[in-house]
Amino acid sequence: MSQQFFLVERGGMVYALPSELVTGVERFTSSLVRLDLALGTSLEVERISMPIEAPAEAARRLSPGAERALPGSLGVLRLPQGLVLAVEPAFFTPPPAARRAPRLDALAEVRGGATGAKGDAMLFRLAGTPARLLLPAGQVLEVIPHPEAMRLEVNRGGLAALIEWQGRVIPVYGFADGPPERVAILRGTSSPEVCAVMVGDRVERTRWPLPNVHGAVADFAPPLPVRGTFGYEGEPLLIPDVDVLAA
């Protein structure tokens, strides 16, 4: 069984739009194409292909975390062009306001291990930022260099790309320009869901609690949901809320 899609380019990214949702195609300007859609709405894109047929086995399911973070997404197709996100028109509406998790403001709680990070821990540089991430070693499943990733047109609350991992497509959070050079696969504490974060090339194994943790670095706002933000060796130190990122 197969389904027909138009490949549309928007914001330099390519998406697959089910052909039954497109009722008309019109050249709008020299650089824009207007698509008339079912339910009487329209969508402007930069390019559109002839309809292509994608077999059902080409589809990759989105993990629940990626699906909920991308309203209007249907799944991912593995095509000769690479990974392509299949979407409904609703995908192109403005993203909802980013969710923020409660912060751990008491430094004593963190030093006492309230984050669950007692024992072995991992330190990463959050790519594209001056911050480092601290996580219990048990939450870090794998570090993958140069993964095949699909960038998204709009960074939605830090969600910048998707990658395929163990047969499912998971969200990748990060702030680096261009494709991720390295990602860490993380799992939550209260669910089996996973996500990925773009990290730098330096990965440190350490022990929690850290000896030089101090109050939050001034003028630094966490770019993704965190359980706490502090200072460490003069730099921001984030404890990401993986349960929120992957949920």
Image: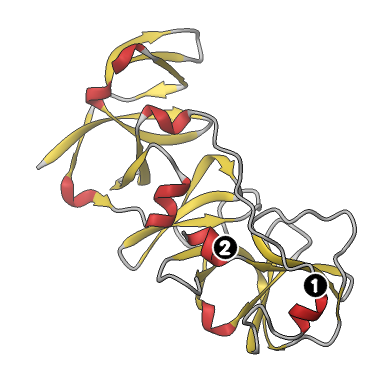
As drawn, the label of residue 190 is none
Q: Percent from the top left, x then y, of residue 132?
A: 73, 69
Q: Percent from the top left, x then y, of residue 89?
A: 38, 27
What's the residue at 76%, 64% (across, down)? 131
What's the residue at 33%, 68% (across, down)? 166
Q: Nearer the viewer, residue 50 or 218?
A: 218
As drawn, the label of residue 197 is 2
Q: Nearer the viewer, residue 191 or 31?
A: 191
Q: Percent from the top left, x then y, of residue 48?
A: 36, 23
Say which residue label 1 marks.
106
Residue type pointed to by label 2: Val
* Residue 47 horizontal side relative to residue 18, left or right: right
Other residues around mark 2 within 10 Å, as few (<14) / some (14–19) / many (≥20): many
What's the residue at 45%, 7% (across, down)? 28
Gap in Å between the C-alphas at discs 1 and 2? Answer: 26 Å
What's the residue at 81%, 69% (across, down)? 230
Q: Can see residue 216?
A: yes
Instruction: Give the quarter of the image for residue 8.
Output: top left
Q: Percent from the top left, x then y, of residue 156?
A: 57, 43
Instruction: Give the quarter of the image for residue 242.
Output: bottom right
